[in-house]
Image (cartoon, rainbow, N blue to C red):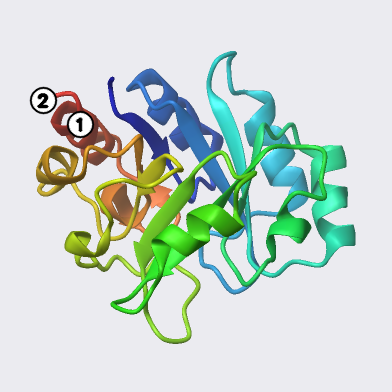
Amino acid sequence: MRTRVKICGITRTEDALTAVAQGADAIGLVFFDSSPRNVSISLAAEIASQIPAFVTVVGLFVNAEPHFIKEVISKVKLDLLQFHGDETPTECASYSLPFIKAIRVKPDTNLVQYAQDFYFAKALLLDAYTEGMAGGTGHVFDWNLIPKQLTKPVILAGGLTADNVADAIVQINPYAVDVSGGVELSKGIKDAAKIAAFMRQVYKK
């Protein structure tokens, strides 16, 4: 089974279309004010409207108020929700769209329990834990902390670049990989050459 790719933190239509042209399976739009990759609802709607069929548009939220999530869903053509905060399984499942749950992994994180608790999630996105940050840190976590067998598909995130993604795929064999900072010129601005290099390494195996 091939490894899927999500390019997250998209803030420009041209970057979204570059990701699609290079073979990305999904793009991520961040709806979190504290993130340098945050997008407005209007900009997100514009970007999403340009995404062709069979490419998944993911909306990322961090402890957002339900009314805000519902407003985004009503105005932006999203296919999937990504919850990156302390949302409960019930909260994540309370919307009209499927979801994935992001887990910031540290040595005492019980991923087996998370997989059981978030039974309705389409996958678990595993990211690096950094105190006080919800994600997008550019740090790699210890992949040995991931159990060999989880009941949910794994999306691997956290510090992935063209230099390490091939090794990550060989070691973890994730369902998908998620990259943001590793393909950027600056926060929120993607680099077409870095996206191309990343995709080449993903499909190398």
Camera-side residue of 148 and 75: 148
Residue denoted by label 1: 202
What is the distance, in whole Å, between disc 1 and disc 2 at their CAs? Answer: 7 Å
- Mark 1 or mark 2, which is nearer to you? 2
Q: Measured along the vertical axis of the image, is residue 146 above or below residue 174?
A: below
Q: Measured along the vertical axis of the image, is residue 50 above or below residue 10?
A: above
Label 1 sits on a secondary structure element that is helix
Q: Which quadrant does the C terminus fall into? A: top left
Label 2 sits on a secondary structure element that is loop
> In the figure, is residue 183 to the left or right of 73?
left
Count of picture labels = 2
Q: Position of residue 123 (x, y in %)?
A: 50, 43
- Residue drawn at the location 41% of the way across and 51% of the way down: 189
Q: Residues within 10 Å of mark 1 (few under 14, many from 20)?
A: many
Camera-side residue of 39 and 160: 160
Q: Point out the residue furthest to the top here.
A: 53
Q: Position of residue 109 (x, y in %)?
A: 39, 73
Q: Amino acid at mark 2?
A: Lys
Q: Position of residue 98 (x, y in %)?
A: 68, 37
User: Which quadrant of the structure image shows residue 140?
Assistant: bottom left
- Residue drawn at the location 55% of the way across and 15% of the way down: 54
Q: Residues within 10 Å of mark 2 (few under 14, many from 20)?
A: few
> Is the residue under label 2 in contact with that under label 1 (CB below 8 Å)?
yes
> In the figure, is residue 30 to the left or right of 26?
right
Taking the image as drawn, is residue 187 in sight? Answer: no
Taking the image as drawn, is residue 49 in sight? Answer: yes
- Residue drawn at the location 11% of the way across and 25% of the way down: 204
- Residue drawn at the location 24% of the way across and 52% of the way down: 160
Q: Which quadrant does the N terminus fall into? A: top left
Q: Amino acid at mark 1?
A: Val
Residue denoted by label 2: 205
